[in-house]
Image: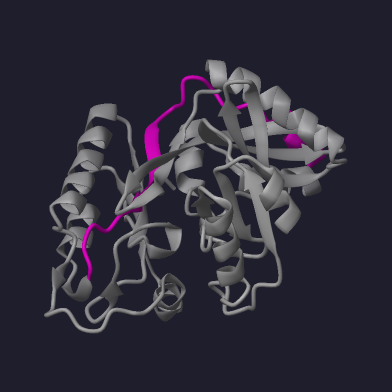
Amino acid sequence: VEEFLCEESYPLVVKPVESWVSAGVKLCNSYDEAKSHVDYLLTRKTPDGASCQAVLCQEVLRGKEFVVDHVSRDGVHKTVMLWVYDKHAANGSSSVFYGYIPVDSESTEAKLLIPYTRKVLSALGIQNGATHAQVTMTRDGPCLVEMNCRAHGGDGVWKPLCNALTGGYSQVDATVDAFLDTHQFSLLPDKPPCPYKAHGQGVILVSHSRGVVKATPGFAAIQKMPSYVYLETALRPGSKVEYTTDLSTSIGACILMYSDKQVLEADLARIREMEINNEMFEYEQEGNILSSKSELHLSNMAETQRIESDRTDIY
């Protein structure tokens, strides 16, 4: 690792090999900064409490990061969904995750991403099952960030949205068909419909404040929105909130979906307004803030609330 750090141009991405929710990922602008972060990671624990055994150093890919989800059977790869990550600078972090947005399957990006990802699947010898690829669209074209031999994450909260977008199927359904129903799998489209049959996206909730929660008026407001489908959060009265700088310090996630795009956009704009104006929470007098992002995440993750809409048009 040290040889790589000495020879590679900066900035570099330094992150733990076994981790999740972007915990421990850092953009380092010099050898000293990278070496310091490597040493730091090797003495810390991952969000699930395990010791960090190894660190990965990577070149920085410039461009938007996309997700290309497939299901394969006997080497036949079918694209079941495409997303683009919505990331912005916030709270001193260069790349805070704000959500994931559907990408039209006939878009210029999709026409490059789909064949590229299928070539990666074939090159890796992946013949069957669900896969979740993350690909950055650089100025030289698509470049693989990682290929996960599993379905899209997030506990599958995106399934109702995918069903609405595609008109009735998701990666979950396609995977079941791939293993249990050859004929049904053969009937699945090669890629999602264009245009999609609904409007929606996944939203990651971002904190621009810190403190001990007294009440959660922002969550209540989200659940009353016309496009609301699902809300997931570990925060409630008594929880401690930090500034969001990565996924592990986000304050929750929700799914929005509606037939009218303007309604969806208005709801999303209101959520972002509540975040900026610190209307998501009412705080107690600030107490002791947890000393690390990992501790904050671990203190809340066991008590995550999953609140589904009672709408009848999405299930």
Q: Is residue 151 left or right of residue 209?
A: right
Asked if one can make out residue 313 in the rendered structure from this viewpoint, the answer is no
Q: Nearer the viewer, residue 70 or 249?
A: 249
Tell me the residue at 40%/31% (across/down): 198
Is 183 magenta? The answer is: yes
Residue 259, image x and y in percent?
32, 31
Whether 100 is drawn above or below 235: the answer is above
Residue 150, image x and y in percent?
69, 52
Residue 280, image x and y in percent?
19, 60
Q: How many numbered marks appear? A: 0
Whether 255 is drawn above or below 298: the answer is above
Q: Which quadrant of the structure image shows residue 81?
A: top right
Tell me the residue at 51%/50% (across/down): 27
Q: Which quadrant of the structure image shows residue 247?
A: bottom left
Q: Is residue 190 left or right of residue 227?
A: right
Tell me the residue at 57%/77% (across/down): 45
Q: Nearer the viewer, residue 289 or 12?
A: 12
Q: Which residues are magenta?
A: 181-210
Colouring style: one colour
Residue 44, image x and y in percent?
56, 76
Asked if one can make out residue 49 in the rendered structure from this viewpoint, the answer is yes
Q: Which quadrant of the structure image shows residue 101?
A: top left
Whether 162 is drawn above or below 119: the answer is below
Q: Is residue 216 left or right of residue 139?
A: left
